[in-house]
Image: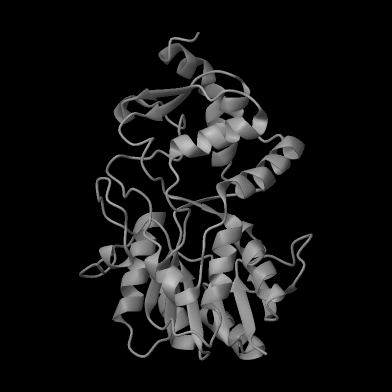
Amino acid sequence: MTRALVIGGAGFVGTAACKELMRRGVETIAAGRTERPYGTFTSYVAFDRTDEDELRRTLDMVQPDVLLDLACYLPDEVAAVARTFKGQRYIFISTGVYPHLHGRPAREEDFVPLEGEPPGSLDYFDGKRWCETLLARTRDFPWTVIRPPAIFGAADRTLRIAAYIQRIADGGPVLVPVESYQRQAGLAWVKDVGFACALASDLRKDTNRKAYNVAFEGKSLQDLLEGIARALGVPARIHPIPFADLPPDASPYGPDPRRPAGYVLDRIRHELGFEPSALEDALAETLAWYRVARPSHPGYANRAKELALAGAA
């Protein structure tokens, strides 16, 4: 039986990944910095991954065949894993690594490893780029990269999907970028990302030193908003304006016109057998959570300014 250690396994994506791994008969151990979180349904181990000795002790104790890393964006932490992990597959979850493609869909080869050495201070997306760069520089280290774009689903702590649900539900216009709201957007359902992680964990498949996109295919921001509206039984009042004029947090998923128009899924489809779920299924589960939890995105506090900008005040 394959054994997987999932760093970040009690989190948003980690929970989905652990469920799918266990469904496939993988012995699954979640890991994090804190003591066992309430509601964690797998075996759990707490350790500080920034302490390389503690990382080594944990890996020696668990002896995972697969190390699924959902909680890393610092290249030093990837380097520590490369020095200490002796299993068969390290799966790194990455995002935001593609350059500005100005509306062209992103293929895995569009990411080019960086040159030089990482700076002392890195934001999240630059950190992911440097982590992938470091992996590309390793020799004989069995890494696989899963690349989702913006992820939504029930219990999404970013509340970005809630920002759109709130605006559709209140009946007012929803501001979107005129340049890009009708082209394919970079979106993925959390269950699909968990499914992709489980597919990549199948040691019978050759994923060594490869990256795989995972996302919805052919779905735009307009499709997302109209899907939410249909599920709520209300009209979708979409109000396009220039991207540069969008107020902060009015459209958390953008899409920025400079960014890729979605992700190409040819590799993960042909090599791992992945197919994205129906957007309607993702929205049904997400809306069920929203109706119970009633979360509010912080940007919704500026809703009056958005309505005024749309001429609806």
Residue at image position (56%, 26%) is 167
Between residues 303 and 26, which one lies in front from this camera angle? 26
Question: For the N terminus, which image quadrant?
Answer: bottom right
Q: Is residue 226 above or below residue 55?
A: above
Q: Is residue 121 visible?
A: no
Between residues 192 and 73, which one lies in front from this camera angle? 192
Q: Is residue 92 above or below residue 291?
A: below
Q: Is residue 106 visible?
A: yes
Q: What x and y, as percent, mark residue 147?
A: 43, 63
Q: What x and y, as percent, mark residue 195?
A: 58, 67
Q: Is residue 98 left or right of residue 313?
A: left
Residue at image position (63%, 25%) is 169
Q: How was this image coloured?
A: one colour
Residue at image position (51%, 80%) is 52
Q: Is residue 17 left or right of residue 186?
A: right
Q: Residue furthest left?
A: 115
Q: Is residue 52 left or right of residue 128?
A: right
Q: What x and y, as percent, mark residue 85?
A: 50, 86
Residue 286 location, quadrant: top right
Number of numbered discs:
0
Q: What x and y, as percent, mark residue 262?
A: 38, 51
Residue 184 location, quadrant: top left
